[in-house]
Amino acid sequence: MKVAVYPGSFDPITYGHLDLVERSCKIFDRVIVAVLINSSKKALFTIEERKEMIKEATKHLPNVEVDHFSGLLIDYMLSMNAKVILRGLRAISDFEYELQIASINKKLSEDIETVFLMSNNKHSFISSSMVKEVASYGADVTELVPSQVEKALKKKYGYDKTR
Amino acid sequence: MKVAVYPGSFDPITYGHLDLVERSCKIFDRVIVAVLINSSKKALFTIEERKEMIKEATKHLPNVEVDHFSGLLIDYMLSMNAKVILRGLRAISDFEYELQIASINKKLSEDIETVFLMSNNKHSFISSSMVKEVASYGADVTELVPSQVEKALKKKYGYDKTR
Amino acid sequence: MKVAVYPGSFDPITYGHLDLVERSCKIFDRVIVAVLINSSKKALFTIEERKEMIKEATKHLPNVEVDHFSGLLIDYMLSMNAKVILRGLRAISDFEYELQIASINKKLSEDIETVFLMSNNKHSFISSSMVKEVASYGADVTELVPSQVEKALKKKYGYDKTR
Amino acid sequence: MKVAVYPGSFDPITYGHLDLVERSCKIFDRVIVAVLINSSKKALFTIEERKEMIKEATKHLPNVEVDHFSGLLIDYMLSMNAKVILRGLRAISDFEYELQIASINKKLSEDIETVFLMSNNKHSFISSSMVKEVASYGADVTELVPSQVEKALKKKYGYDKTR
Amino acid sequence: MKVAVYPGSFDPITYGHLDLVERSCKIFDRVIVAVLINSSKKALFTIEERKEMIKEATKHLPNVEVDHFSGLLIDYMLSMNAKVILRGLRAISDFEYELQIASINKKLSEDIETVFLMSNNKHSFISSSMVKEVASYGADVTELVPSQVEKALKKKYGYDKTR
Amino acid sequence: MKVAVYPGSFDPITYGHLDLVERSCKIFDRVIVAVLINSSKKALFTIEERKEMIKEATKHLPNVEVDHFSGLLIDYMLSMNAKVILRGLRAISDFEYELQIASINKKLSEDIETVFLMSNNKHSFISSSMVKEVASYGADVTELVPSQVEKALKKKYGYDKTR
């Protein structure tokens, strides 16, 4: 059975991430979306909130699981008996950074492969940080994130008062 | 069963290609190395020669097959009931070209996914055309291609003096 | 009155080009789509065919004109009393090439400005040469080019026999 | 009347920015240089100081105005009845970031266009942050910024010996 | 005598840096590895620790010296009577940043040249910050840094307790 | 003595090339400008014409020599007892191509180093092929090439009839 891990911050999950998960599900037997606990980076949502949003957004996909991890990705991979890391490529700057990460992961464990999917053109400009920036001013993000995430963003930024 | 197709000219196969095939074999159940017949591009080796060299180089890999095709890759994919296209990424210029190809393939068939593996650092500078350029002057290419390919190149360029 | 010239081969015009023309029309008073006669590059359609297709595709845009030119773009600009060159940016490789062209045009005439619009994400992978490649195998290009261009491509490649 | 907005931090304005303003003035009827109030980014100069320096540097250009805004650029554009965002392109990293910003702005308002001008080769390496870095060590910046900005930098960094 | 300065943070020195020093030694008569004192950037190792590690790693190279400096590189170059700045290029993002730095250095002093060497493929993914990230989780870094640096990293991150 | 070889087509030499030669002269004891004989590429000027133009343009530089070679650059380097290849970097596309060439040269001979200088901003858009394109239409190229090259171009393209 081919198990792939899709690691990231997912703060919050966007339609760009979701597109990647949906496409990976057809290629691999089991896909684990793994939220990285990174204490040095300030997040908007807690790990639990992020996992909840991912679960809700992927509940139609039977072979997807949601998890979290801290420390080195490679150690997490080994503990899950997973051999494939999934990553999306949006832009050149992604490309270089991902290449470095993939190289060092290869160096740390010869057995682990990083597999890249190109982002869908329609979603290629969406990043979690841009979604947060735009949502913080009360702009409409319905085309960028699932509706439950949109509601959570409105709540965080205090735009849900009228309801 | 997950079938992946690795299309290309392979004129001739290099250690860079071979590295990609070996790594893909662990991710997919069946990998088809498919030589593209491109009548508008002048090749050094015939389709048969190229397929022979790939077969020889991949004979230790039980789930690899060697084939050829002409026309649109998507049509070939459908005929083989394969859903995954395999591509290597070496450099930024690859990245952009591959992104365009992947986008148009996605447009032509929603079901087909292109999956990218980063080239091994050690092999990232090897391309078939450079190998041919260098071999044409009689330079040593033992670190760039399998030994049978090296012999074939020497023969093509007339450096096999023992004949 | 601000006149902008959009130069190119347009062999044939695609939805990517058309999107750019439509957006430029709102920014400039008059937009001239200018087909470059380049004797050293083999084209699929004649200059007249290309101009006809552009005219048909832009007939809903009152401030668009279609023309052709040969020689240096700068000389054509001066003859049309136009100060702005319009270019689309799709990818990094475009970016660099366009930067060189814009620099040399600036050097040749201080008064001419090159103005860039980013390609719409939806169309960023469409190029005339890819459209031709795909159409030559009889694949469906209805999402890539206007319907009259699609018909012309089918005719050129002999896929209109059943009609 | 075509109104273009050139948004930025301008902390402080450089010859690179000024070159872009001068060139835009010939293309658009009215150009608004709009200083973004970004409370999360520590600036060297106050909004008022920055606006003063831009006014001084552009006083020879009759169709330029200087303004400031906070919040989403798109909201500011609508409030000014402006349809065109002006941006300079210096490098690949700019290109990708600008592409993302332009895409999200397009998504937020279909009517707004982002128009790019390539930076003049002579100024392509000048950024406000480099100017500040260099000026903080007392190095000569007369070729990088207008003379009044140079004086202001000297004063900020304590190199105005006459005090 | 041709003197070249290789400036950097070297926090800590990696096999990537060392490869560059070894290759530069054959091109220039004297190579000065100069640690930049940058008070605004938090470092893992002190200036003295970094210099010690570089000295230890380059002790087999007779024409290498180790030094430190603060302020503008150009001022340091002049004080050392050195005309050549040495830099490694690993990736596109390096390329652009380095181009900007080289341009501004050229502007500040016409006599100074920046000379670039491409990073060895084998080391192109190694950066000091990645080494620190990986080492902080106790992962093996013997292929990334000299053994004395590895020991120093283990000590800093508390993985040397068993000894 | 440090000998550097600057290989290229130089069809014809431009101010961009010349700037690089002048700067290299200060770094290396002896600089050989080596015209590559490439029978598969159609040139405008003969090898002799190209060498003459380079000699004329570099006659003020005592440590510059002009030569030509065919075959592999590495073989030429060894025959000249030179250890350093000189290359200019103008753009990202250069960067990647040069990186590949430098890697394969390193592979072919461990002793040879490729050293890169960034192109002067002022000349970064000049390429021999653009100069030829522009000159072929009779446009002014005095800012792009030395005056003797300009005359030679006029003669080749038949714009010297009035003399």
Image: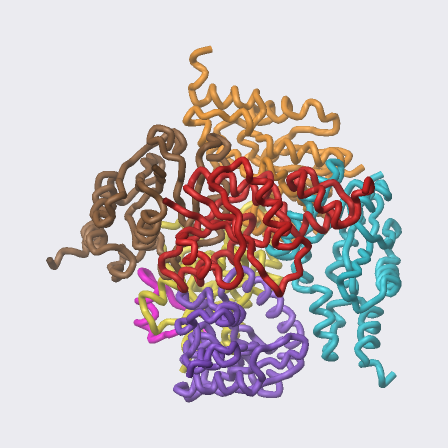
Chain colours: A brown, B red, C purple, D yellow, E orange, F cyan
Residue drawn at x 39%, y 31% as measured from the top left: A72
Image coordinates for residue A13, horizontal then vertical, percent: 29, 49
| Any part of residue A101 in sight | no
Rendered residue at 65%/55% (across/down):
B46
Report x, y in % for residue C101.
Answer: 62, 69
Task: Please tell me in which quadrant of the rendered image residue C59 appears.
Answer: bottom left
Most foreground residue, E140 or B103: B103
Tell me which corner region of the image, top left, top right, bottom left or bottom right, holds residue D103: bottom left
- Where is C1 relative to E147, above or below? below
Taking the image as shown, residue A25 lies to the left or right of residue C11, namely: left
Name the residue rendered at 71%, 34% in the picture. Answer: E31
Residue drawn at x 75%, y 63% as measured from the top left:
F41
Relative to E141, is B106 on the left or the right?
left
Asked if the stretch drawn in magenta spans residue D75, the answer is yes
Decide if residue F9 is in sight here.
yes
Residue B45 painted magenta: no
Quarter holding the C terminus of chain F is: bottom right
Magenta segment: D63-83
Q: Quadrant of the N terminus of chain F?
A: top right
Single out the residue that lies furthest toward the top: E163
Q: Is residue F147 left or right of residue C25?
A: right
Q: Nearer the viewer, residue B142 or E127?
A: B142
- Residue E18 location (% of width, % of height): 63, 31
Can you give x and y, in whole percent of width and height, for residue C26 in the image?
40, 80
Depicted C32 relative to depicted B118: above or below: below
In the depicted structure, whether residue A60 falls above or below residue F159: above
- Count of labels shown? 0
Left or right, E95 with reference to F151? left
